[in-house]
Image (cartoon, rainbow, N blue to C red):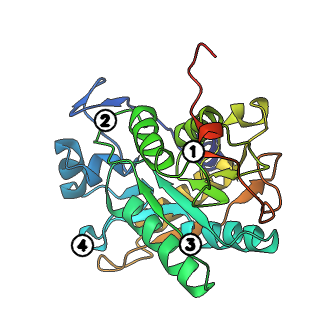
Amino acid sequence: EQGLHQACARRGWILTTHQFHSDLLLDEEVHGDGVVALPEIVNFGYSIGKTLIASPAPLIMLGETPSTLDVDFVTGDDAAALSLILKRLVSLGHRRIAYLNTEPSCHEIDRKRDYFNNLTDALDLDTCPVIECHTRSGEPAAEPAVRALRECLSHHRERLPFTALISCSSPGSLVAMRILHEYRWRVPRDCSVICMQEDPSASYVIPALTNLKWDYLQWGEHCITLMEKRLNGEASSGQRLHIRIVPEFNWRESVAKAPANRSRGSASARVPITPSQ
């Protein structure tokens, strides 16, 4: 929001913010020469999304939507981000890498999972599982992640099926670190963990969590640049405008070299600890 405010202020534009919840706007109806919105209102079929798409005012999404909707968007370059992550992990000796999918199914989330599968195939890595959490729309990501990871680790108490785990969300990353601890696996000695979201608290957990770093002022500027093109008639109605932004990374203590091939200990040594322990 700060990036949008600054980009609008440089042009002498006025930005008004509307809070969205479920299928209702908490403020008055949206009016303006153009609208910037989150993709959830379209991806999950909310009525306000259909209204905005039908409106003659330009609509710019802060995230990708299906190409069939023909909506302009600014988004992070997930393919580039995953490529950077995987190449770094490979350079550290990792060959078995898991992807924790904690978000509800939608166009952008499904494409991110497909990027992971395609890139691990291209890098000729060993079996790289996708751990599906089956999170429903509107459901917090933590509980489904807990269930999915416990189900996975309960079948692999002597040897982890992966040496690194990439989570598509911050809650999923924090849950992964906790559940690995419950099953007596150490981060990063036994398993590296990476988060594909930015989270200011990531540097305060132990070990500090590796995650993405976005320049949100850049996001705001790109959104308003596309809006400006639409308002000035610089793009045809059949032309879909988009910008993909490559993130940077905060590489922290949650990532290390792949563990050497060694005995993992007996199954009894991997009985999960309880919160009281």
Residue 232 appearing in the image:
no
Residue 229 falls left or right of residue 84: left
SS at badge 3 = helix
Q: Of label 3 and label 2, which has the lower sequence position?
A: 3
Residue 33 falls left or right of residue 160: left
Residues tagged 4 and 2 counted as in contact (Cβ below 8 A): no
Tell me the quarter of the picture where residue 64 sits: bottom left
- Residue shown at 57% from the left, 45% from the top: 4
In the image shown, does 118 or 108 lie closer to the viewer?
118
Q: CA distance from mark 3 to mark 4?
A: 20 Å
Q: CA distance from mark 1 to mark 3?
A: 25 Å
Q: Of label 3 and label 4, which has the lower sequence position?
A: 4
SS at badge 4 = helix
Tell me, for residue 4, which label it has, or none: 1
Location of residue 35 in the rendering, given as x and y in whole percent from the top left corner: 38, 48
The amino acid on which the numbered mark 3 sits, given as a three-letter code, is Ala
Residues tagged 3 and 4 counted as in contact (Cβ below 8 A): no
Reading the image, the residue beneath label 2 is 138
In the image shown, does 81 or 174 lie closer to the viewer?
174
Location of residue 128 in the rendering, given as x and y in whole percent from the top left corner: 54, 69
Q: CA distance from mark 3 to mark 2?
A: 25 Å
Residue density around tag 3, few if under 14, some if 14–19, many if 20 or more, within 10 Å: some
Reading the image, the residue beneath label 3 is 79
Tell me the quarter of the image containing the N terminus. Answer: top right
Tell me, for residue 173, which label it has, or none: none
Q: CA distance from mark 2 to mark 1?
A: 26 Å
The amino acid on which the numbered mark 2 sits, given as a three-letter code, is Gly
Residue 244 appearing in the image:
yes
Q: Of label 1 and label 4, which has the lower sequence position?
A: 1
Reading the image, the residue beneath label 4 is 68
Q: CA distance from mark 4 to mark 2?
A: 24 Å
